[in-house]
Image (tube, grey):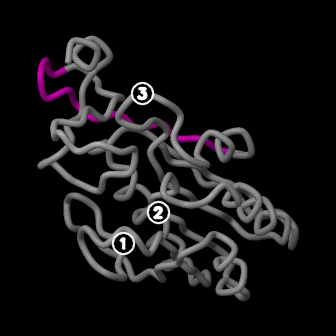
Amino acid sequence: MFIEPFKTGVDSGWIEVICGSMFSGKTEELIRRLKRAQIANQRIEIFKPAIDTRYHETDVVSHDESRIRSTPVTASQNILLLAEDAEVIGIDEAQFFDAELPNVAETLASKGVRVIVAGLDMDFQGQPFGPVPALLAKADYITKLHAICVVCGNIANYSYRTSADEGRLVLGEKDKYEPRCRKCYHRG
C-alpha cells in the first residue's frame, strides 16, 4: 500500500512511478491517487499520449472502467505548457511518450509539483520500455504492481503478446496481450 508523503513546503515536489505488466492495475491506482488529490481540493491535471484511444479519446480509463478526465498530448513537453497551475500531475501510459518525459517530470517536481506517472516497465519482449526506466531512476517513490498469470495463476509481471502483430508499439487489450509469470512467459 502506498502512503502519500506530506507536502512540507513550496518546493517539495516529487515523482511517483506506478509500473508493472498489463492488467496489473496501474491506471486504476493512478486514478485512485488522483481522486484522493481531488478530494483534498488540490489542483490536478491529467495527461495521456494522444495515440492511446483504446477506451476513450480523452479520458484515462482503467480495465475495470474507472475513469478520469485527461488531456491527450502528442509530446511530453506539451505537459509543461498545459500544467501551469497544477499541484498534482497525473500521466498515464508513460511508455508511449518520448524520451523527454523524465526531464519534464523532473522539471515539474523541482517546481513543487507532485508528479504521478503510470506505465509499463517492460515491453512484450521483456525489455525496458520507452522512458519508464529513466523515470524509475528519477522517482522518489516506486510502486510495482503485478497481475495474475492466466496460465498458472502465479504472480505475473510480463505482458505476453498473443497476436501475430509485428512492431514494438501495438495497442491492444485482452485481444492481443495476456499477463504471464516468468516461467509461463518464457515457455511461450
Mark 2 neighbour density, 10 Å: few (under 14) some (14–19) many (20 or more): many
Q: Which residue is mark 1?
A: 60
User: What's the amino acid at mark 2?
Assistant: Asp
Q: Position of residue 85 (x, y in %)?
A: 71, 88
Q: Which residue is mark 2?
A: 92
Disc 1 secondary structure class: strand
Judge from the rendering whether residue 153 lies leftward or rightward of residue 53; answer left or right: left
Disc 2 secondary structure class: loop
Mark 1 neighbour density, 10 Å: few (under 14) some (14–19) many (20 or more): many
User: As rendered, which of 118 and 177 lies closer to the eye?
Assistant: 177
Judge from the rendering whether residue 158 lies leftward or rightward of residue 96; answer left or right: left
Q: Quadrant of residue 87?
A: bottom right
Q: Quadrant of residue 52?
A: bottom left
**Which of the two discs, 2 and 1, labels the residue nearer the N terminus?**
1
Labels 3, 2: front one:
3
Point out the stretch of residues depicted in magenta: 141-153
Disc 3 secondary structure class: loop
User: What's the amino acid at mark 1?
Assistant: Val
Q: Are marks 1 and 3 in contact (CB under 8 Å)?
A: no
Q: Are marks 2 and 1 in contact (CB under 8 Å)?
A: yes
Q: Is residue 13 a member of the stretch shown in magenta?
A: no
Question: How far separated are the C-alphas under marks 3 and 2?
Answer: 20 Å
**Which of the two discs, 3 and 2, labels the residue nearer the N terminus?**
2
User: What's the amino acid at mark 3?
Assistant: Gly
Q: Which residue is mark 3?
A: 126
Question: How far separated are the C-alphas under marks 2 and 1?
Answer: 7 Å
**Residue at the image point whose x is 51% and y is 41% from the top:** 129
Judge from the rendering whether residue 171 lies leftward or rightward of residue 73; answer left or right: left
